[in-house]
């Protein structure tokens, strides 16, 4: 965990796809695109199909014939290629997709550190202005899952795919850490009556409003005092 990477592959910029995944079903229930000026253009004119372009679909749309950004590709990549390969304990974390912008002059402007979950973002410089934050983790790049790789493997996988427009899948490091440490028998549920999330221990059948209530102190026996009425 002491390995760090500095400014790999040039600058990075983004078109962000914020994907909201239902914690019970794992299905994407919301998606929002937020392109910024200077990012990969949302439309690229073309008089004919010129081959597949990552993250884009060729069609006749409101801007004419050409390639349009396709949020469905982001959803398919996340659901089909990334999430199934992640450890089950934290694959239902909240993920989002970002786009790399390779800037030969300014570099990435990122300090990345090796972690069991992927490349942890340790510092983001002002230029070129990444939409990543300290405390986040890059779990995959272009469908290649970084989680679980050694530091040399992770670096090699990242460098190999560090092209302009490469897709990154990002999560909150604290969230995935907490989920990875959670008892796999404890699952989050939802109470329709009280409109509130609660937790169920699949082995004991106990329910509680907080995870902590289902995780007794070392040496202590479980009690039903924290049970939620759901």
Image (cartoon, grey):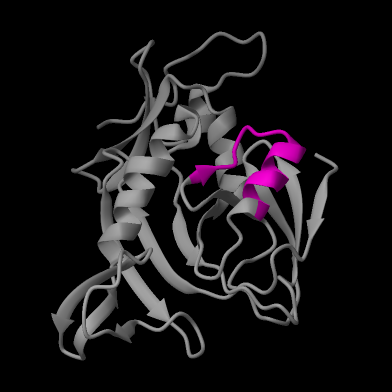
Q: Nearer the viewer, residue 229 or 149?
A: 149
Residue 216 location, quadrant: top right
Query: 209 above or below 71?
Result: above
Residue 49 at what x, y percent from top left? 23, 73
Residue toward you, 164 or 114: 164
Q: Is residue 96 left or right of residue 27?
A: right
Rendered location of residue 123, percent (x, y): 76, 65
Instruction: Report the number of numbered marks.
Output: 0
Residue displayed at 51% across by 63% down: 166
Q: Is residue 158 magenta?
A: yes
Q: Residue at x 48, y 90 (%)?
A: 37
For residue 50, above or below residue 204? below
Q: Nearer the viewer, residue 214 or 132?
A: 132
Position of the N terminus, as image quadrant, is top right
User: Is residue 150 rendered magenta in the image?
Assistant: yes
**Residue under the point 31% across and 84% down:** 43
Q: Residue at x 27, y 77 (%)?
A: 68
* Relative to 39, 78 lies left or right: left
Residue found farthest to the right:
2
1 horizontally vs 43: left or right: right
Res. 70 image quadrant? bottom left
Q: Give the vertical position of 59 relative to 159 (above or below).
A: below
Residue in front for this viewpoint, 24 or 142 = 142
Residue 81 location, x and y as percent?
39, 42
Residue 200 sits in which quadrant?
top left
Q: Position of residue 93 (x, y in %)?
A: 46, 45
Image quadrant occupied by the C terminus: top left
Give the magenta range. 144-159
């Amino acid at each position: 965990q002491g390995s760090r990477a500095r400014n790999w592959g040039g600058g990075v910029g983004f078109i962000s796809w914020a994907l909201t995944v239902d914690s019970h079903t794992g299905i994407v229930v919301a998606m929002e695109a937020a392109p910024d000026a200077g990012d990969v253009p949302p439309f690229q004119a073309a008089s004919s199909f010129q081959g597949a372009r990552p993250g884009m679909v060729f069609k006749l749309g409101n801007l004419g014939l050409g390639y349009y950004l396709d949020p469905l590709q982001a959803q398919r990549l996340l659901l089909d290629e990334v999430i199934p390969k992640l450890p089950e304990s934290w694959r239902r974390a909240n993920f989002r997709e970002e786009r790399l912008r390779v800037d030969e002059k300014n570099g990435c402007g990122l300090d990345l550190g090796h972690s069991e979950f992927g490349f942890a973002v340790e510092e983001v410089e002002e230029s070129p202005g990444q939409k990543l934050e300290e405390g986040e983790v890059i779990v995959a790049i272009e469908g290649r899952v970084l989680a679980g790789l050694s530091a040399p493997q992770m670096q090699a996988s990242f460098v190999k795919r560090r092209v302009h427009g490469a897709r990154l899948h990002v999560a909150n490091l604290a969230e995935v850490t907490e989920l990875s440490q959670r008892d796999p028998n404890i699952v989050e549920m939802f109470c329709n009556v009280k409109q509130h999330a609660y937790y169920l221990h699949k082995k004991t059948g106990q329910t509680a409003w907080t995870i902590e209530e289902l995780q007794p102190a070392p040496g202590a026996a479980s009690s039903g005092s924290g049970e939620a009425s759901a």
